[in-house]
Amino acid sequence: MTGEVRLGLYKGNMFVESRLSPHSLYDEGVATMEGGGSYNQDDAEGFLRIQGLPSRVQGRVNPREF
């Protein structure tokens, strides 16, 4: 591993302030959702509907009494 890490110390805590490496795999052009144009926000709606399906089914089977 090569590179540099800058750490910050504050009241007994340690945190990473910055990282720098000549061999970094991070590419901001690929990591950003705005730049590449490949992210469609409408896709998130379908994903959330699929992820929430078990909760919706559970709510119909055992509805809450408020």
Image (cartoon, grey):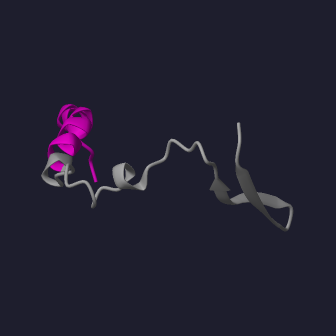
Is residue 14 or residue 36 the one in the foreground? 36
Task: Give the residue at x 25% y 54%.
Answer: 36
Q: Which residues are magenta?
A: 45-66
Is residue 57 or residue 65 the one in the foreground? 57
Task: Give the residue at x 71% y 42%.
Answer: 2
Image quadrant where residue 46 sits:
top left
From the top left corner, tell me how far across and down residue 51 is, in percent.
26, 37
The answer to whether 22 appears left or right of 2 in the picture is: left
Most prominent secondary structure in the magenta stretch?
Answer: helix
Is 38 placed above or below 34 here? above
From the top left corner, tell me how far across and down residue 48 is, in percent.
22, 44
From the top left corner, tell me how far across and down residue 64 is, in percent.
27, 45
Image quadrant where residue 13 sits:
bottom right
Is residue 13 or residue 35 the one in the foreground? 35
Question: Which image quarter is the C terminus in?
Answer: bottom left
From the top left corner, tell me how far across and down residue 65 is, in percent.
26, 48
Task: Give the residue at x 21% y 51%.
Answer: 39
Tell me if residue 50 is in the magenta stretch: yes
Image quadrant where residue 57 sits:
top left
Tell me if residue 52 is in the magenta stretch: yes
The residue most toward the right is 12
Task: Give the residue at x 25% y 32%.
Answer: 54
Is 61 placed above or below 12 here? above
Question: Which image quarter is the N terminus in?
Answer: top right
The answer to whether 15 appears left or right of 65 in the picture is: right
The residue most toward the bottom is 10
The answer to whether 12 appears left or right of 29 in the picture is: right
- Total numbered labels placed on residues in the image: 0
